[in-house]
Image (tube, helix red, strand yellow):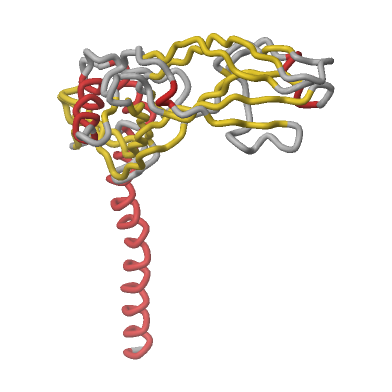
Amino acid sequence: MTRAGRRSHRSKKKRITLALAPVAALAVAVPLMSSAGAATASEVTADCSADSGKLENCQFVDVQFKRDSLGPNERVSAVTDNCGSTATASKTFNVSASVTRTIQLEDGFTAGADTKLGNSFFEIGLKFSTSEINITRDDKTTTLAFSRTDTVQGDSLGFFMWSAKRTDVSGFLRATYKEAQDGQKVFFAPSDGAASVHVFYPQLLKNGSPDGRLWLRNVKCGTPEASGLRNSTRALRSEPGFGEGGENVTDVEIPLAEVPAP
């Protein structure tokens, strides 16, 4: 009886221990679940963009940068038609392009210069503007505009292409809220240390006009590339980069030193 009693006593202890284990696990889970109410990355982005009154501050934190990053390939003149002629033709082109500071975060994202975040973008831009490379730090537009006479090849369409030079600064947003949320006031978008928010600061020449690559493009008439141009009503459409148009496309780079100063 004594042995049986001892065995019974020990088994009761085991049963008590096992019964307590789920309770302990539940106690650990409670604080973990309570953090679900903290500001999400999308909420941080929205609050920063709107300069929400809930914020004490919102800053763009730079992580890495790349100078001389080329922007989109843009068609910046009307298309001149020299189809059906075997001879070259001199044509006058009116060229117009503009650059401004842009933020690559999500569709519709903006940050005015008078907001906390807009001011942070300006300060970061100031950091990367040097005597060698001058960049546009605010959201003001800088324009490249001129007229020029050039040669269009026989049986070809001719037009000007442009790709702006930019300083690509990547990092993340850090928002500080006035009131703590679940004991925390500082939140990040998309995360602390990320380099997925890009701010493109256009680079300027010493004369104040935008820096970049400018080229005259000739496209053979009767080709798929020419048909695409004729059917397009948009000046800014997806275009191949310099020298990447294929056998039916010829590109000639125009030095910016030949472009009249603004």
Q: Which residue sits at x=68%, y=25%?
A: 218
Q: What residue is rendered at 33% in x and 37% in y?
A: 169
Snapshot quadrant of residue 19? bottom left
Instruction: Using the image as rendered, state which of residue 116 and residue 18 is in the foreground.
Output: 116
15 vs 163: above or below: below
Report which quarter residue 135 is drawn in: top left
The quadrant of the image that shows the C terminus is: top left
Q: Is residue 223 left or right of residue 161?
A: right
- Give the percent coordinates (x, y) of residue 185: 18, 33
Number of residue marks: 0
Which residue is nearer to you in this view: 124 or 134?
A: 134
Task: For residue 261, say whether it is visible.
Answer: yes
The residue shown at (36%, 42%) is 66
Task: Name the spot of residue 158 as percent of width and height, x first.
Answer: 67, 19
Q: Position of residue 126 (x, y in %)?
A: 20, 29
One can see residue 30 in this view: no
Residue 59 spot, x, y in % from top left? 22, 30
Quadrant of image for the N terminus:
bottom left
> Looking at the image, which residue is at 31% across and 37% down?
172
Residue 257, quarter of picture: top left
Q: Nearer the viewer, residue 217 or 114?
A: 217
